[in-house]
Amino acid sequence: MQETLETVPFSCVVNGEPVTLAVSPRATLLDALRDKLELTGSKYGCGEGECGACTVLLNGKPVNACLVLALECSGTDILTIEGLRENGNLHPLQQAFVDHGAIQCGFCSPGMIMAAYALLESNPTPTKQQIERSLEGNLCRCTGYRKIVDAVQSLADGVTSHA
Amino acid sequence: MPDSTIDLPTKRAAKKSLIGQRIPKLDAPEKATGLARYLEDIKLPRMLYGKILFADRPHARIVDIDTSAAKKIRGVRAVLTAADIKLVPFGFGQDNTALKAERVTCIRDEVAAVAADSPEIAALAIRRIRVTYEDLPLVTSPEQAMADGAPVIHEKTQDNIPFRYDYEHGDIEKGIQESDAIVEDTFDLQRMAHCCLGTSGIIADFDAQGSLTLHSLTQVPFQYKHDIAPIVGVPPQKIRVIQPPIGGGFGSKLDIHPFEPICVFLARATARPVRLTFTRQEEFLATPTRQPMAIHMKSGAKKDGTLTFRDVRMTLDNGGRTSWGATTPWIMMRTFSSLYRVPHVRQHADVVYTNNIYACAFRGYGNPQATFALESQIELLAHKLGHDPLEMRLKNAHDSRETTAQGMFLRTCGLKECLRASADKAGWNEKRNPVPGKPVASPGEAQRVPWPSEAPPCDAPKSEGCHGQAERRPEEPTTSEGCHGQAKRRPEEPTTSKGWHGQAKRRHEEPTTSKGWHGQAKRRHEEPTTSDGWHGPTNRLVRGLGMASLFHVGGGAKIYRSDGCGTMLQIDDFGTVTVMTGASEIGQGSDAVIAQIVAEELGLPLKNIRIVNNDTDVTPWDVGVHASRTTFIAGNSALRAAREARRKLIEAAAAKLQRKPEELDLSDGNVIERATGQPVESLGKIIRGIHFGAKNALVMTSEYYEPPSSPPDKKDRGDISGAYAFGTHVAEVEVDLDTGLVKVLKICAAHDVGRVINQLGIEGQIEGGIAQGLGYGLTEDIQVDAGRVLNPSFTDYKLITTRDLPEMEFTFVETRDPAGPHGAKGFGESPLIPVAAAVANAVYNATGVRITELPLTPERVLQKLQEAQV
């Protein structure tokens, strides 16, 4: 067990901006985002890839940031929940989560939204079953998921506001 | 002041009530964008990181703790053991201390703690602490704890039974004599973990004058401040509790947990702010659960279906320490006595120390356990007497304006409406098997064949019965819809959806399967497989319908001398209303409900309302978030404060306009003429007129609302809540006789909510409650062996996911409770309570097999089916 943890530099693109960071070899992508870049929207829920609260897009693909070593992300393109807003406006998917009541305690919401975003990027018109399958890896303890699925479905249906 | 600065609409629009609308939570945009600052996101200057060493021995004497190696690590700022702090007993049983001095009585007992420059250093230091233990004889079950000569777990409780609860009305012997049918069972209920997505944590921060600020996740900030003061040796007047957004509560934050004073001790020892947060494993191991218990119940009924008696003996596994959870029999007895009319009821509960982990409050507060036992027996009695269980429940249901045998006055009771509505929506008469386990054959539905048999290969999935199976094979197209879905995922297909406006620049060529890193191993508990790799459809799928009702407090519970809530309200010159409420927001949506109530009263748009609800230096006193009390009590408090502000505004307007107050009303930011609805003056002018006119006053009001409830008498009778909630769920299930898999197809829920204030919020509560209830009924079980937790992770503790959701249909019965704000009752806990009972009753209806344990895992169901030779 190392007592002094040396850091190693690496570069990547986060939310469209190139960044260079120095992290411990053991640091996860989630550690790097939260502690180094202060992008605290991605949440620690379990640290073992079971809850999905830390879901971000790594080269367009949804990953649990707690399972990816930060140094593996050298040269990659990362999108976090903070990167969804444009010009200070909520992304339509974020707005749909708000309008549909898909958010209660909100702790799962950033990961849930990123997982849904990844789905819609790859398949803009998913069926309800496809939405349910895609979000299966994201746990929510408050909402019972129905309003989350409704929110995602509303975009698939071309409805951006339901309030 | 120019009018343009006033954020008030001046155009007259038709007055539309906000009550009953679909209103998103006020903090939802912060949470949707990742901008909400949860506890784990807060970093104070010079903040240190705390970590705790847990005993990892269920019962042992602490011989020695060697912290020397830990203290030598660079970056370690404090290492504490019980020897370093003043030990003050706390908790409902006064049997807990922040750190343990001589003995540990469960694996989660806190033995030492560290504050360091980083979480990594703190974790390293914890690993370097050496504790020498001498193991003591282990008590792993209440039976063992109550046996003669059992090891004593806490010296002051020689019999290992720290609490007993007795309740009685009528005469059980008489009830037995009056009965034509009697059933008797023992129900075995498991531990359930809260699994708040945000783990536990706290920040402790002393200022130069020794005042303590706690950034805490507590659900009960005022009680918390009062209770933590003596433990940490800071007077309550020098403690400020700030509540950041929390990642779920569900009752878990009702207690003071040892990690909280520990963090204060670390902050004091280092003179720096300290944040202490749990890992998920620590969360599973070192936070309390729902009470595990055995409920022995005997009940009877007359030939005509009238209930005669109910005799209950319960044994609760209290674990090694006592939390609020030890008081759940106090709520459970109310369901036994008052869910239905029963003339003779007796309850005895023993709360027993063991060396297991301990339990605390969890949504429903013992009531899901009580309801499971009670409603299972209603079904059995109905079957024995040949009655329709619905009719039998209706026959014994209370009515409005009735006082129950335990002295609870039901100003309103919509139970009969709930029973009928849920049954109608579920197709009770058409779909239910009149005889449990004897499904009515109908075309297209699966038929039963005798056990055992070879499972035939899958037939074409044309029947409804096969639909669920098909869903479990994502890799194969199953329906036409499913096929299209697959095809549409192909990357070369144009993605010109009208609905999805994703940022094209970030699109990636690689098609995501959307599985990716997610969701592996999620379904292991529930999908036993056959040799061909999955439990292929057989014709041995059977369906059934089951029903369960609930009774719960819907307006607080008077356990303290006051069950009230304070509100302070002020309106600024710009028409912004700041509502300072004692009511905590734990994700349940009290912010939106309170804003709606205030906006409605003042005729202002919702965006003019700000809710301040998270700082004990600012907000007035409240008991806390529990007992489904916030909408009812905080809502009433806010309503009255707003009404008083409204009175002031209308009086000022009347004086200015030389009209009678009763001729005027407030709507859409204006003073209007009641008769015509025409605006006569902008509200902004009235507000500023009060401020800068002759009166020189501000529009500020305050209210302390105390519900019309009373503490129970010595026999535990009394009207303890401001309102009472009722509801009924009907579950439709499909049971695979070859695998034991229970699939819940549909839940039809009807609830007496008094009145819906926020349609969106109440749906969210019911959907979330059903999901938690399904977890309790089907998958969730903290397994403890020899005092040790076997499954402390989401890998091995299975929560319901998007894939497990049944169809749901809701009915809100609006009984308009005369004491509720706009007639509303509290609702937070209700929807979870009857779910497991309804599902188990449906399994009984489908298979004829009564299962008296939870959860209904395939393994358990299969075993019971085999025992019953189904």
Image (spheres, grey):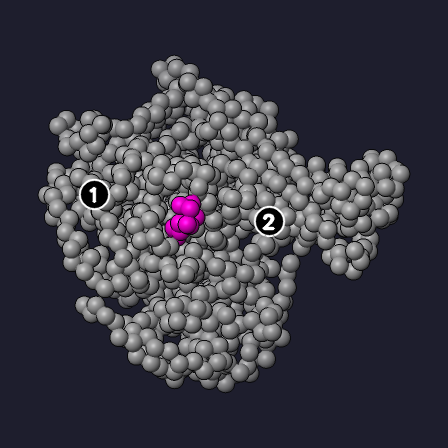
- Position of B734 with respect to B82 (left or right) is right
Q: Which residue is mark 1?
A: B83
Nearer-the-camera pick, B537 or B858: B858
Chain letter of the residue beneath label 1 in the structure image: B
User: What residue is disc 2 on?
Assistant: B611
Q: Is residue B20 visible?
A: no
Q: Is residue B837 above or below residue A158?
A: above
Toward the viewer: B497 or B150? B150
Quadrant containing the N terminus of chain B is bottom right
Kindly identify the amino acid type of the residue bearing the numbered disc 1. Answer: Ala
**Based on the displayed image, in which of its 4 quarters is residue B751 positioned?**
top right
Q: Residue at x 53, y 83 (%)?
A: B505
Left or right of B644? Residue B375 is left
Q: Is residue B522 above or below residue B105?
A: below
Q: Position of residue B216 (x, y in %)?
A: 42, 49
Q: How many marks?
A: 2
The residues colored magenta run: B203-213
Secondary-structure class at tag 1: helix
Amino acid on which disc 2 is placed: Ile
Circle 2/circle 1 CB separation < 8 Å: no
